[in-house]
Amino acid sequence: MINISDYEMRCGAFAKILIDKVGKKALKLFKSYNHPDLDGTGKEDEGETKVNDFRRKVFETELEAYHRVQSSSLLRKHTPAFYNQIQTGEIINGDTNVTEHYLSNCCFEIEFIDGNHVKIGELQSNATLLKHLEQQFGFNLKNLITEFHSKGIEYTKDSSIIYNANQFILIDFATIDCEKFRPIIESGSDDPYDGIRLD
Ligand SMILES: Nc1ncnc2c1ncn2[C@@H]1O[C@H](COP(=O)(O)OP(=O)(O)OP(=O)(O)O)[C@@H](O)[C@H]1O
Ligand SMILES: [Mg+2]
């Protein structure tokens, strides 16, 4: 069982991040069709099945990316430690059962990183900060991105970076850019990946 009120929370478009600062852990918990955050996003046009299948697929491409990271010492150094997929079970928020707001078992646990946050695109266009961080941590961002790609982790362009005195860490990456398999409302097909090649 997960009680959301036991954690500090950060929010993304796909997931809630439940932070345990004492244990230095972060749970990335993926939202389902029923999450109130999706209200007003036009989800009804796609329907529950397509929305949830799409979001599950996003989770899978992120989970697979964390597995692939483990085979590279360079990538392990610049990503949060990965503590595995989590079987979610019942999810409550205080007294309220919110299990239906999340995709069951679409959750993984990673290291919580404290520090400054910057989107990768912002860093790439801030030459001064980039040079400073590359010198401080003795790495090259282009080479790091090449290493992600060489492991089949193609989607890093919307990643974020968290850095502190000791760490330069990329978060939010995936094997595939989810825009490539986002459901097409007009397709009329029940298969959200209809006509889309995932290789
Ligand atoms: N391991 C971590 N340590 C510290 N903060 C984190 C960690 N993972 C995520 N966060 C925080 O939570 C936010 C959302 O996480 P993340 O980007 O993984 O979610 P998302 O749903 O994929 O978001 P997006 O809408 O950007 O795609 C991040 O911007 C960051 O502030
Ligand atoms: Mg994301």
Image (spheres, rainbow, N blue to C red):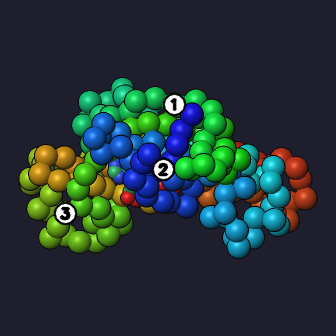
Q: Are marks 3 and 1 in contact (CB under 8 Å)?
A: no
Q: Is residue 130 left or right of residue 8?
A: left
Mark 3 surroundings: few (<14), some (14-19) or many (≥20) residues within 10 A: some
**Residue behind mark 1:** 85
Residue type, mark 2 in image: Ser
Residue at position x 17%, y 53% in the image: 164
User: Sequence order check: which comes first, mark 3 or mark 2?
Assistant: 2
Across and down, in percent, residue 74 comes to: 26, 36
Task: Check the image and report above or below for 134 versus 75.
Answer: below
Residue type, mark 1 in image: Gln
Is residue 107 or residue 169 the one in the foreground?
107
Residue at position x 88%, y 50% in the image: 190
**Residue behind mark 3:** 130
Across and down, in percent, residue 37 comes to: 62, 64
Residue type, mark 3 in image: Leu
Cα distance between the residues tagged 3 and 2: 37 Å
Is residue 16 or residue 187 the one in the foreground?
16
The residue mark sitting in front, 3 or 2, is 2
Q: Is residue 81 left or right of residue 164?
A: right
User: Sequence order check: which comes first, mark 3 or mark 1?
Assistant: 1
Residue at position x 63%, y 32% in the image: 89
SS of the residue under disc 2: helix
Q: Residue furthest right?
A: 188
Q: Is residue 101 left or right of residue 149?
A: right
Mark 2 surroundings: few (<14), some (14-19) or many (≥20) residues within 10 A: few
**Residue behind mark 2:** 5
